[in-house]
Image (tube, grey):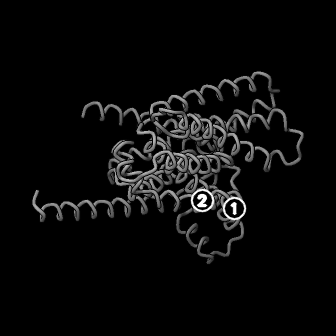
Amino acid sequence: MSEAAAIAAWRTLGARRAAVSAAALAGLAASFAADLATGPALLPIGAVLRTLAGINDDPMLAAIVLQLRLPIGLMAIIVGAALGLSGAVMQTILANPLASSYTLGISAGAGFGAALVIVFGAALPFAQIWAIPTAAFLFAALACALVAAAGRLRGATPELLVLAGIACLFLFQALLSLLQFIASQEALQMIVFWLFGSLLRASMTKVAIVATVLAAVSPLLLRDAWRFTALQLGDDRARGLGVNVDALRLRAFAAVSLLTGAAVAFVGTIGFIGLVAPHIARGLVGEDQRHFLPASALLGALLLSAASVASKLILPGTVFPIGIVTALIGVPFFAWLVVRGGAR
């Protein structure tokens, strides 16, 4: 390829990436507006926008939009971005397209932590406010630490890390089943509801916590973007380029632990966002991590925001658990990705 052709191809790729980002941002804005407008009481988009701008004098409308629906809409965007970004990092450092916080047991660890408090800590006065999210966060970190510990073994490979993650998944699922077996009927209902995933308990305080974690972790991951790109060439080649592979994976696992723990602590376990969003981003912007990581976060936010809208439209007047909706959307889409990959 001549130099002029290479420059033209690079400019075309850059224009495509810019167009993808613009389209995703526009879709996210439209989905966010629809999320605020939909619900048991359907609201006109214009009225919602005027309320957000502070030029609506209807107190009832302001209460519905600003106090009830705005935290849910923002939480969907922030949690989706965190899950999409964590999934992209997991797939990169493990060199496995099936890797995500959900498939490797990190979300299962969070679910076990939440169930542990529900079963044994229901008498705590702060259990419903902070104990359940805190336990979910800590056990998500524990699951991630177990997988990372496997990576510290001599001769550890990405394949071993994946197997360690699958082992964590089955371990925490078994422990969770044990808790469900011994739980009371009331506690069992709470566990099942939490495991379904729901945005209905979102508040601006919780949104601020998850947003703070996302804002703190994202720059650290983007700083390592070129190292993640080098890692895709293989561990040996990455080391030849001066990358400390073990330290990079350790930092990545710590970041994934923070993102996943904060994301699922308040909304429950939500699957397929961290699995599907990176695949879409990879097909649209390529493997360059400088563009792949932000695109995964953006598309994760778009997918979960769209799922939030869908959860309100399946049955008018009823809000489906968001985890069920993401599974209904994610399973056929991921099957299509697998079939398309096999055809290629």
Residue under numbered circle 1: 204
12 vs 267, nearest the viewer: 12
203 vs 5, nearest the viewer: 5
290 vs 211, nearest the viewer: 290
Check disc 1 and give the amino acid type. Answer: Met
Q: How far from the left and from the top, in percent, is residue 190? A: 75, 36
Q: Is residue 45 left or right of residue 143?
A: left
156 vs 280, nearest the viewer: 156
Check disc 2 and give the amino acid type. Answer: Leu
Instruction: Identify whether 106 is placed above or below 244.
Output: above
Residue under numbered circle 2: 74
Answer whether residue 119 is visible to the viewer in this image. Answer: yes
Q: Is residue 245 left or right of residue 3?
A: right
Q: How far from the left and from the top, in percent, is residue 20? A: 34, 59
Judging from the image, what secondary structure is the residue with disc 1 in?
Answer: helix
Q: Which residue occupies 41% across, 58% down?
A: 24
Residue furthest to the bottom in view is: 55
- Label of residue 157 in the image: none
Answer whether residue 308 is visible to the viewer in this image. Answer: no
Nearer-N-terminus badge (2/1): 2
Q: Which residue occupies 73% across, 23% down?
A: 178
Measure the C-alpha gap from mark 2 to mark 1: 9 Å
Q: Which residue occupies 36% across, 45% down?
A: 232
Judging from the image, what secondary structure is the residue with disc 2 in?
Answer: helix
Quarter residue 71 falls in: bottom right
| The N terminus sits in image quarter | bottom left
**Disc 2 packing (10 Å; few <14; some 14–19; many ≥20):** many
Q: Would you say the residues marked 2 and 1 are in contact, meaning their CB atoms lie under 8 Å apart?
A: yes
**Disc 1 packing (10 Å; few <14; some 14–19; many ≥20):** some
| The C terminus sits in image quarter | top left
